[in-house]
Image: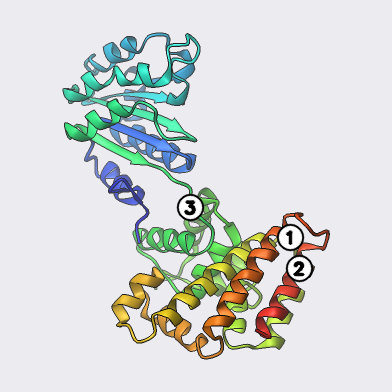
């Protein structure tokens, strides 16, 4: 599933850029800097050859812009011995701060350029760590259909990261099973840069079937295919206490490779979906898939199987215990070791 940003997905936008389907203006803003950096890099690499960059690439940092009109003048210049010139503002959130003009006021002056940009200029505005304050400029880009406004939000740990990983794997022409997907997402937390880097590495190592397997991940990334959050989820789903505590024991021996905060996040997501399933029993497969945020009939079936072991009341209690464990594992109201708290949580879940 694509991660949507104002009707524009990262991978969809990246695909267009690589196909040289350029827009005159790109407004890239939001908290997730990885997407912004990668899109900027892709635009430059695909629009200009290394030789062309010497004469047709202008990169300006927001704090160095004393007057936004100089940027507009730059955008109105024609390329030298190239089809395009590329003008990039990095750290646009700092425009106007040095001369106290105000970020929004300065950036909004660009709205007039957005109405009729020069087709041979690719203008890229990178506003990292926050939403762009020049809303009039961004709205002008959308209204006049002269470019793309892409909001880059950070992804939550758990299922959102799994969906992002799945989409990226598919974009590379590979496939991945649910267990391998969970292993990857659990290992990287919400670090999208690391997630894509690990997938890129695995892409090189896959066999002729282009399938990313748990065994491939174990050999090359160092995540155990037998002791991970996917296996813990499976053990709890079937109330397999022996397997669950074997995994927790492994976590105790390898705390850096298995952060408690990520495991707790996974458990919260899983039992939240289990609760949703129980409240929607009797609904159609399509309704269940939409409510659970998955396109996998297999995952819906697995959650359905687990619902036989946990009542609605049990799910409510478990979610409450997970929240309590999360707070305590962060040092609030408890001095217990994080893994000890996790062990206690798993015991409660198994006896709910």
Q: Is residue 229 left or right of residue 120?
A: right
Say if mark 3 contacts mark 1, CB within 8 Å.
no
Residue located at (33% from left, 45% from top): 14
Measure the C-alpha gap from mark 2 to mark 3.
26 Å
**Disc with the residue nearer the chain's start (3 vs 1):** 3
Q: Is residue 304 left or right of residue 21?
A: right
**Disc with the residue nearer the chain's start (1 vs 2):** 1
Q: Which mark is residue 263?
A: none
Residue located at (38% from left, 60% from top): 167
Q: Position of residue 148 (x, y in %)?
A: 27, 37
Residue located at (46% from left, 60% from top): 160
Q: Which residue is mark 2?
A: 341
- The residue furthest front is 313
The answer to whether residue 225 is seen in the rendering is: no
Q: Is residue 189 left or right of residue 301?
A: right
Q: Which residue is mark 3?
A: 155
Q: Nearer the viewer, residue 301 or 73?
A: 301
Q: Position of residue 291 (x, y in %)?
A: 37, 71
Per the image, label 3 sits on a secondary structure element best described as: loop
Per the image, label 1 sits on a secondary structure element best described as: helix
Q: Which residue is mark 1?
A: 328
Depicted 315 relative to depicted 101: above or below: below
- The residue furthest bottom is 308
Mark 2 nearby-residue class (10 Å; few <14, some 14–19, many ≥20): many
Q: Nearer the viewer, residue 39 or 351?
A: 351
Q: Where's the C terminus, which quadrant? A: bottom right
Q: Nearer the viewer, residue 351 or 265?
A: 351
Measure the C-alpha gap from mark 1 to mark 2.
8 Å
């Amino acid at each position: 599933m694509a991660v949507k940003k104002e009707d524009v997905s990262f991978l969809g936008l990246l695909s267009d850029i690589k196909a040289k389907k350029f827009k005159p203006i790109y407004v890239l803003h939001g908290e997730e800097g990885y997407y912004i950096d990668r899109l900027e890099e892709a635009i430059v690499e695909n629009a200009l050859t290394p030789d062309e960059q010497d004469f047709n690439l202008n990169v300006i940092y927001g704090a160095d812009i004393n007057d936004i009109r100089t940027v507009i003048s730059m955008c109105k210049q024609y390329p030298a011995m190239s089809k395009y010139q590329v003008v990039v503002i990095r750290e646009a959130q700092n425009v106007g701060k040095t001369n106290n003009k105000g970020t929004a006021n300065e950036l909004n002056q660009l709205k007039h350029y957005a109405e009729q940009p020069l087709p041979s200029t690719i203008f890229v505005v990178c506003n990292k760590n926050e939403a762009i304050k020049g809303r009039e400029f961004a709205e002008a880009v959308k209204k006049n259909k002269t470019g793309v406004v892409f909001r880059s939000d950070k992804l939550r740990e758990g299922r959102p990261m799994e969906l992002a990983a799945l989409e990226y794997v598919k974009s590379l022409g590979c496939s991945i099973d649910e267990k391998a997907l969970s292993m990857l997402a659990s290992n990287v937390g919400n670090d999208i840069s690391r997630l894509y880097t690990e997938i890129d590495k695995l892409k090189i190592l896959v066999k002729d079937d282009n399938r990313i397997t748990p065994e491939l991940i174990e050999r090359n990334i160092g995540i155990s295919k037998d002791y991970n959050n996917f296996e813990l989820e499976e053990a709890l789903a079937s109330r397999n206490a022996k397997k669950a505590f074997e995994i927790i024991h492994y976590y105790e021996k390898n705390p850096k490779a298995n952060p408690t905060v990520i495991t707790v996040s996974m458990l919260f997501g899983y039992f939240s979906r289990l609760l949703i399933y129980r409240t929607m029993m009797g609904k159609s497969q399509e309704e269940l898939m939409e409510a659970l945020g998955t396109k996998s009939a297999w995952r819906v079936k697995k959650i359905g199987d687990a619902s036989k072991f946990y009542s609605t009341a049990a799910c409510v209690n478990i979610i409450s215990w997970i929240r309590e464990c999360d707070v305590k594992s962060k040092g609030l109201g408890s001095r217990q070791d994080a893994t000890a708290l996790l062990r206690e949580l798993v015991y409660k879940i198994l006896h709910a």
